[in-house]
Image (cartoon, helix red, strand yellow):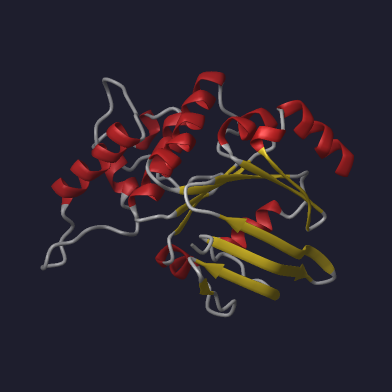
Amino acid sequence: MAPLIELSGITKSYGHVDALNGVDLTLHDNEIIGLIGDNGAGKSTLIKILSGVETFDKGTMRIGGAAVDPGRHTVKTARDMGIETVFQDKSLGESQPIWRNFFMGRHRTNPLGMIRVAHEKKEAMKVLTKIIGLKGAGLSADAPVSVLSGGERQGLAIGRAMYFNARVVILDEPTTALAVKEVDKVLGFAKALKTEGKSGIFVSHNLHHVHDVVDRFLFLQRGRVVHEARKADETPESLMATLMKWS
């Protein structure tokens, strides 16, 4: 079976700055990989290319075995090919109800073009409670996002990505600025990807969080993959030693 994602020799430059320089990456079915590297290593550029926000200059990209045309790869085509990305800002409307955020930009409509409100509320709550595992007496489809904790907002964003037939969910720094209890929730949400038969890419500066979730690690430095390892061969401490070696 072909890898879900296969990158070969991917390069991306901004003027005279090489953000990515010959990056190779593979992601297999029901696997989560962690991207590790200092600021400026190329992590953000790489996930933007995968998610269709940016294009690449050279190299080849295959998603589900199908070649990707860099000139036509957009957020929509990435989603159509099964890639959903939860960026650091999560793109949630604070004053909007949970169900509207869940279906934002992709509402289900009836033959008259009207939003199927009852259906969307039911579907949103099913995913958030049964798959993601959100709990709370005040949790309802009509509650505004502002009542959710930071971890619960990440759960909403991850659940939304999983619902729309994603095969791969990319998580960009999902535990940043969260309290310990909220971090535990988010790591649980990330692990739920594999339970639901999905694959993922987990980007984080926290090596303990990465080690807890992923199966394999890729270290980026100055736009290149400089080291790759499997979870069974690493500890958070050895990951830190490798990171320091290449910094």
Displayed quadrant of residue 133: top left
Report the label total.
0
Q: Nearer the viewer, residue 101 or 173?
A: 173
Apparent side of residue 41 relative to residue 103 in the rendered image (left or right): right
Horizontal side of 215 relative to 119 (left or right) equals: right
Q: Is residue 247 visible?
A: no
- Indicate the position of residue 67 as horizontal and vertical percent values: 54, 75
Residue 201 at x, y percent in the picture: 57, 48
212, above or below 65, in the image: above
How far across and how far down the image is residue 247, in percent? 87, 42
The answer to which quarter of the image holds residue 179 is top right
Horizontal relation, residue 133 to residue 241: left or right? left
Say whether residue 153 is visible: yes
| Pick the front one: 139 or 243 | 243
Res. 99 image quadrant:
top left
Foreground: 146 or 229?
229
Identify the residue at horizontal 56%, vertical 20% (top origin): 180
Q: Where is residue 161 drawn, in percent x and y?
A: 40, 49
